[in-house]
Image (cartoon, rainbow, N blue to C red):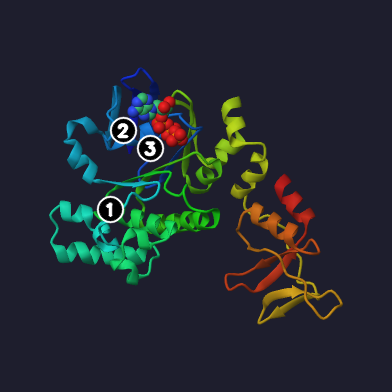
Amino acid sequence: MIEFEDVTKQYPDGTVAVDKLSLQIPSNQITVFVGPSGCGKTTSLRMINRTIERTSGTISIDGTDINSQDAVTLRRGIGYVIQNAGLFPHRTVVDNIATVPKLLGWDKRKARDTAMELIERVGLDPKMAERYPAQLSGGQQQRVGVARALAADPAIMLMDEPFSAVDPIVRHQLQEELLRLQRDIGKTIVFVTHDIDEAIKLGDNVAVLQVGGKLAQFAPPAELLANPADDFVRGFVGQDRGYRALTFVYTDQLTVQPLPADLALTDGVPVGWKNGSEKLEPVGAVFKRGDSLRAALDAVLTSPNGLGVVVDDEGRAVGVVDQGAVAEALRS
Ligand SMILES: Nc1ncnc2c1ncn2[C@@H]1O[C@H](COP(=O)(O)OP(=O)(O)OP(=O)(O)O)[C@@H](O)[C@H]1O
């Protein structure tokens, strides 16, 4: 656990970036710092690896004050990913990733083997190992940044707006990859973003900060959406928080109807709706039992006839739901 106790950061010009921040960041989970520009997210994050020194208060990791150890040693044990990846331009991908292991004195072979493993782990083609950062896309550079942060297998990884500079589609892919990776590696991740959707998607817990570095609320995303602590959080979480909250309501209670005859199937997989003409109409989004109600509603809304298709793990249709069933599940 990383614990902030009454932590304040005042810059030499008098700016109080973080004001008496107290919170507990659980181990092996993703905690997101979110809030408007200038609210002290980056300052709070960088105080954890002491690239910014706090003015007062205590930060401890598993009960040990981070000031009781040498800052460089502390930093080498904490992965750090920043926007635009911050890769060394004159080092190849594999050398970038092996940077910290080499600093830690690992032998060259082990450092390289670990780097090659990580290249695959973050979803990159091993052929990219010998390229230079400028020869990669923005999304690929970010993956290298994540691999580099993981190279020495740190227990903690700090991520500062790591996906902000890529387009929305790549950003979505990188978010999915991070969640997939985290299921395997179970690191303590502290992630900074100004995007509430990203915070809700990635965070096990979300800390909403207010300008002046004050903690407005610290809660799991579902709780944040259901019970915003005050008007600031309500405003920040946004108008459509009710719709976002559907992400955390599951479809187990949904009344599923049998497959109608006008749903065309190939090997059980829905391929379109018959509408009397030769051409089938697209099925729309499909969802699985156990998915969120947001997924079910999306299937209903994108279906040409208002029937959302439920599929099994192999993608075979098992039934349909209509909007009445979704509304009923919402009330239950
Ligand atoms: N070196 C510095 N000297 C003086 N003030 C600073 C310094 N670095 C940051 N600040 C100020 O501290 C406050 C918090 O900055 P910080 O970068 O932590 O915010 P942030 O929430 O990460 O912002 P953003 O989302 O825009 O990156 C801001 O008012 C900023 O101008």
Q: Please name which of the two marks, 1 or 3, marks the residue nearer to the observer.
A: 1
Contact check, label 3 and label 2, Cβ < 8 Å: no
Kindly indicate the quadrant of the structure image that contains residue 224: top right
Residue 149, given in percent of the width and then of the height, sits at 30, 51
The residue that appears at 79% across and 78% down in the rendered structure is: 279
Mark 1 → mark 2, Cα distance in angstroms: 23 Å
Kindly indicate the quadrant of the structure image that contains residue 140: bottom left
The three-letter code of the residue at mark 1 reads Phe
Give SS at disc 3: strand
Q: Is residue 318 above or below residue 204?
A: below
Q: Is residue 158 left or right of residue 240?
A: left
- Say which mark, if any, is on residue 88: 1
Q: Is residue 232 above or below residue 75?
A: above
Q: Nearer the viewer, residue 129 or 201?
A: 129
**Disc 3: which residue:** 25
Residue 184, given in percent of the width and then of the height, sits at 38, 59
**Disc 2: which residue:** 47
The three-letter code of the residue at mark 3 reads Ile
Query: Could you classify mark 3 by the number of other residues whose Cα lies within 10 Å: few (under 14), some (14-19), or many (20 or more)?
Result: many
Residue 207, given in percent of the width and then of the height, sits at 46, 34
The residue that appears at 24% across and 54% down in the rendered structure is: 152
Kindly indicate the quadrant of the structure image that contains residue 285: bottom right
Tell me which label, 3 or 2, sits earlier in the chain.
3
- Quadrant of the frame with the N terminus: top left
The residue that appears at 40% across and 65% down in the rendered structure is: 123
Q: Which quadrant of the render holds ligand 1? A: top left
Query: Could you classify mark 1 by the number of other residues whose Cα lies within 10 Å: few (under 14), some (14-19), or many (20 or more)?
Result: some
Q: Nearer the viewer, residue 191 or 262?
A: 191
Give SS at disc 2: helix
